[in-house]
Image: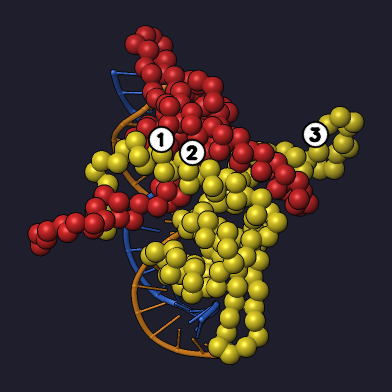
Chain colours: A red, B yellow, C orange, D blue
DNA sequence: CGGTATCCGCCGGGATACTG
DNA sequence: CAGTATCCCGGCGGATACCG
């Protein structure tokens, strides 16, 4: 169904691209935000798994792969034994830090406001 | 298993309460961020459904109910026919606006950087 | 150490029909 | 207009086992 593009018409590339939704798509995923948070400093895989409580290797890997695909983090492999892999933020990832800081700050205050009946594990 | 709480010990209420994760829990949900975004202004139900492209009544309702439960939005029912319901941000919700603005701004720049091969519907 | 590979359960999200 | 009430499905997340 080929059709010509008229002048002044919105290019297909811009259709349905809402910036907020774009952001939503990137951080959607149960562990991504907390992962990015800890990646404010460069971390190794096992380190991340210890820092993020309750995540398994498999899931951690998949979340990291998606963040990598979305150009939020960089994966650096050291060719040595035992293996060593370091994860760090890309420029896009670093530019997201302020938002993470805000979310942390907001969460602190928000959690303040409803500090009753907090469940422990 | 009653046990005494020693001085200086971390109260149970604070255990496992990570501010960033707390925030994550509130905004987790496919449509919540974009909903909050549009609620910078008070909106009616049908209005929201038009503003959020692709969401059905049922899902929109459930997302709104969760945001209400988390004290992010307020639901005001006008007792009249035809029914009229207005949604607006609570104080907690309003305090989240800066983050939404940042996310929008970030999404704009982020989308810029990879504007190729954007899929249309 | 830092992963795959595989299987599985669950529930969040979607579609449809009905209602005050 | 602004919702319920069901049913259903896909896929994300979790558990386990194995590997270079």
Dot 1, how many residues are within 10 Å of its Cα: few (below 14), some (14-19), or many (20+)? many
Dot 3, how many residues are within 10 Å of its Cα: few (below 14), some (14-19), or many (20+)? few
Give the image location of residue B20, x and y in percent. Answer: 61, 39
Q: Quadrant of the C terminus of chain A?
A: top right
Give the image location of residue B22, x and y in percent. Answer: 63, 45
Considering depth in this image, is A60 or A73 the residue closer to the camera?
A73
Q: Quadrant of the N terminus of chain A?
A: bottom left
Q: Which residue is mark 2?
A: A32
Q: Residue at x 24, y 53 (%)?
A: A11
The residues bearing labels 2 and 3 have C-alpha atoms spaced at a distance of 27 Å
Q: Which residue is mark 1?
A: A67
- Pointer 1 or 2: first along the chain: 2
Asked if residue A35 shows in the view, the reply is no
Q: Are marks 1 and 2 in contact (CB under 8 Å)?
A: yes
Dot 2, how many residues are within 10 Å of its Cα: few (below 14), some (14-19), or many (20+)? some
Q: Which residue is mark 3?
A: B10
């Amino acid at each position: 169904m080929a059709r010509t593009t008229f002048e002044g018409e919105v290019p297909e590339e811009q259709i349905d691209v809402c910036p907020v939704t774009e952001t939503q798509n990137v951080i959607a995923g149960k562990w991504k935000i907390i992962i990015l948070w800890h990646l404010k400093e460069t971390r190794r895989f096992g380190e991340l798994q210890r820092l993020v409580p309750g995540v398994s290797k498999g899931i951690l890997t998949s979340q990291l792969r998606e963040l990598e695909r979305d150009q939020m983090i960089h994966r650096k492999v050291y060719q040595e034994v035992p293996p060593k892999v370091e994860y760090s933020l890309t420029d896009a990832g670093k530019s997201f830090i302020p938002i993470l800081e805000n979310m942390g700050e907001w969460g602190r205050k928000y959690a303040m406001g409803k500090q009753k009946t907090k469940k422990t594990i």
